[in-house]
Image (spheres, helix red, strand yellow):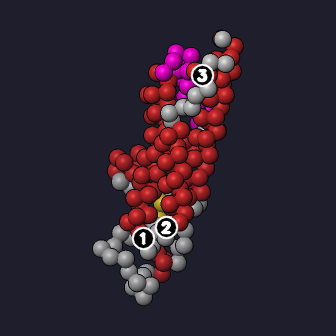
Amino acid sequence: MSSECEFRLRAREPLLYAYSALELLDHHDQFDEHREWVLFWVGGVALLRTVGHVLQKVDAVGSPELGCIISSKWAMWKENRQENAIFWDFIEKERNNVLKIFKLGVFVGQVPDHMPSSDECVSNICEKDIPTHCETGEDGRDLFFDAVMWWQEQLAAIEKEWRLSCRTSN
């Protein structure tokens, strides 16, 4: 089998960083380290969407055959929006909210000049111990995890289809 058949998509690079951002979100307290948490969220959301851009604009142009596989995946994601809702309703939407109008899709409390002590804190902020997604009410980190896993599955399927295609053409 040619080495061309044994490759990894470049889109895996931003996905790996997105996974690292998720780990940082899980290990940083959104109240004690509010600014850092927001930075990890914004960066992670941008990385989640970057996976798709690299897939479409870098990986797809590497070879015509791989480009066809990737184009057909994009067409399927667009056609089956409900089955791929994590992309449309979270990855795409949250990226647009964060990067175009700086509106976080998760509730992480108010943006203070300084982090308030527990005595200063308003109860509806400090009693929330999870970053709640504003539309779904879910822990935003769970949605982030689902997005990472969705990309992992999509990239693995593309790589598998490419290897099969590559084997039959050689």
Tag 3 residue: 3
Tag 1 residue: 33
Q: Are marks 2 and 1 in contact (CB under 8 Å)?
A: yes
The disc, 2 or 1, on the residue closer to the chain's N-terminal end is: 2
Query: Hey, what amino acid is under mark 1?
Result: Glu
In this view, the residue farthest toward the bottom is: 119
Give the secondary structure at mark 2: loop
Reply above or below: 154 against 67.
below
Q: Quadrant of the N terminus?
A: top right
Please provide percent x and percent y for residue 34.
41, 68
Residue beneath the point at 69% across and 21% down: 164
Query: Hey, what amino acid is under mark 3?
Result: Ser
Please provide percent x and percent y for residue 147.
57, 47
- Disc 2 to disc 1, C-alpha distance: 6 Å
The disc, 3 or 2, on the residue closer to the chain's N-terminal end is: 3
Q: Are marks 3 and 2 in contact (CB under 8 Å)?
A: no
Residue beneath the point at 62% across and 29% down: 159
- Circle 3 packing at 10 Å, graded few (<14), some (14-19), many (20+), is few
Total count of labels: 3
3 vs 2, front mark: 3
Please provide percent x and percent y for residue 91.
50, 45
Which span of residues is magenta-colored?
A: 62-81
Residue beneath the point at 39% across and 70% down: 110
Tag 2 residue: 28
Along the viewing direction, whichever of 100 and 170 lies nearer the viewer: 170
